[in-house]
Amino acid sequence: MPSSKPIEELPYKARVYINNQVLLPARLVKALGIEWAKYAEITIKYNDCIITLKRVALLRTRHTASRQFTIPKEVRDKYGIMPLDEIEVIGIRPLRNKEINAKQVINE
């Protein structure tokens, strides 16, 4: 049985978990050099719609470099994103401390 290709670059296709979170694998996080980031601006593609999520918290576990982020409820409602749907992460830009205080904005 062939093994899956390691994810080390964007774009990255992922499934939305039941809790509306999306996993960013450790190899991708390390390849992008964003282990230090607590917040990011993430651009995703769903049903040919490009969605930019600003000021998204990157959740982490204690012993791994992988991260998860939650798709905000207003975005899920607006675009009809449901658990187990597939999205494509096309951009991740880590935010510095001064950018975190800005209000979260959703662009289309």
Image: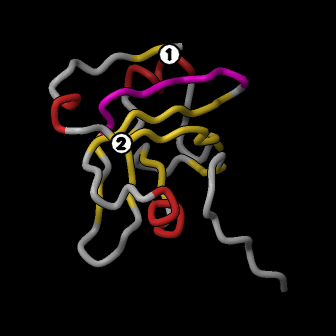
Q: Is residue 1 above or below residue 9?
A: below
- 65 is higher (above) or lower (below) than 33: below
Q: Which residue is mark 2?
A: 94
9 relative to 54 in the view: left or right: right
| Residue type highlighted by circle 1 | Lys
Name the main secondary structure of what is drawn in magenta.
Answer: strand
Q: Position of residue 58 (x, y in %)?
A: 32, 49
Residue for point 47% across, 20% down: 77
Q: Position of residue 104 (x, y in %)?
A: 28, 21
Give the residue at mark 1. Answer: 78
**For the residues bearing labels 2 and 1, Cβ distance under 8 angstroms:** no
Left or right: residue 93 compared with residue 56: right
User: Which residue corresponds to the image point at 42% horizontal and 28% vertical from the top-left?
Assistant: 53
Quarter of the view holding residue 87 = top right
Asked whether 2 or 33 is in front, the reply is: 33
Residue shown at 28%/68% (left/top)? 61
The magenta-colored residue range is: 48-56
Q: Amino acid at mark 2?
A: Pro
